[in-house]
Amino acid sequence: MKRILIDSRSLVDILYKHAFDQLMIQTDQLRPVKTTLVGFAEEMVHPLGSIDLSAVAGTSPCQTEVRMTFLVVDTPSPYNAIIGYPRLNLMEAIVSMRHLLMKFLKMFGVGEV
């Protein structure tokens, strides 16, 4: 999946409904959540639910795979997902906003996205 925003200030990982629909996962697979999110424009956003998915970053042999819990939201966005800093920390990733690049160390070298 392309068009994923890396947000080092976000506490949660977001999957937008239009991207969730492209994955062809039934909505009954979503777990209910009671949390309300505050959007970029300070608006309140109520997630449709949460789902655990595997995410792979990079290309073989320098790639990493992590299990992520996404909150699915039905709001317009040019992005398919937002990855927050807890997952970046789990991937041991270094993000350079200036270079629009994320790097992570793997056994066979340095992976990058």
Image (cartoon, grey):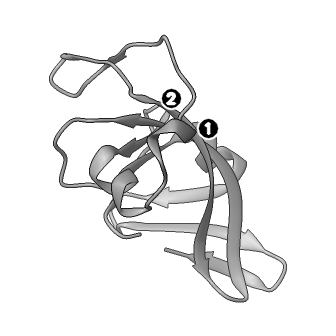
Residue at the image point whose x is 44% and y is 62% from the top: 23
Name the amino acid, label 1: Pro
Q: CA–CA distance between discs 1 and 2?
A: 7 Å
Compared to 93, does 46 lie above or below? above
**Along the line of sight, which residue is nearer the eye, 34 or 62?**
34
Compared to 30, does 22 lie above or below? below
Query: What number is the disc on residue 18?
Result: none
* Residue for badge 2: 11
Disc 1 crowd rating (10 Å Cα; few below 14, some 14-19, many 20+) is some
Q: Residue 88: x percent and y percent?
A: 59, 49
Does any portion of residue 2 appear in the rendered image? yes
Q: Residue 14: x percent and y percent?
A: 42, 40
Query: What number is the disc on residue 86?
Result: 1
**Along the line of sight, which residue is nearer the eye, 97 or 41?**
41
For residue 79, what is the image quadrant?
A: bottom left
Q: Is residue 20 left or right of residue 65?
A: left
Please, what secondary structure does the residue beneath circle 2 have?
Answer: loop
Residue at the image point whose x is 58% and y is 77% from the top: 58
Name the amino acid, label 2: Leu
For the image shown, how many numbered marks are present on the structure? 2
Residue at the image point whose x is 39% and y is 52% from the top: 20
Q: Residue 21: x percent and y percent?
A: 35, 54
**Along the line of sight, which residue is nearer the eye, 58 or 23?**
23
Compared to 97, does 84 lie above or below? above
- Mark closest to the chain's N terminus, 1 or 2: 2
